[in-house]
Amino acid sequence: LIVQPGISPWIGIWIGALVAGLLGLGLGALTLRLRGIFAAVMAWFVGIALMGLVRNLTPLTRGSLG
């Protein structure tokens, strides 16, 4: 994501940290009321959904090539 737009790696690190934090807050808000195995399944599902999203956004992420 840094190579194509030509962003500095240092700025990319901060953007990545911000996006990861926001995704963590979103996942936390979704799973806050869930307990035990249900929270684990929800986190697992979100990971699989994000993996599918990254693979299908080939113009931006280059899909499976990274």
Image: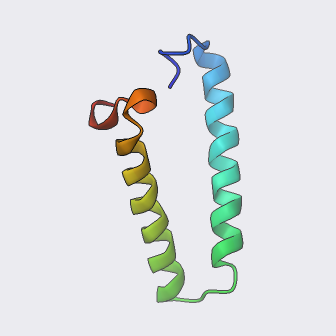
**Which quadrant is home to the C terminus?**
top left
User: Residue 47 location, x and y as percent?
Assistant: 44, 60
Residue 27, image quadrant: bottom right
User: Residue 54 location, x and y as percent?
Assistant: 42, 43
Given residues 34 and 54, the one toward you in this image is: 54
Q: Is residue 57 left or right of residue 43?
A: left
**Residue reaching furthest to the left:** 65
Q: Which residue is drawn at 37% across and 53% down?
A: 52
Taking 10 as reference, is 53 above or below it? Answer: below
Q: Is residue 37 left or right of residue 17?
A: left
Given residues 31 and 62, the one toward you in this image is: 62
Taking 56 as reference, is 8 above or below it? Answer: above
User: Residue 50 location, x and y as percent?
Assistant: 46, 54
Q: Residue at x 43, y 69 (%)?
A: 44
Taking 13 as reference, is 49 above or below it? Answer: below
Q: Which residue is drawn at 71% across and 60% down?
A: 25
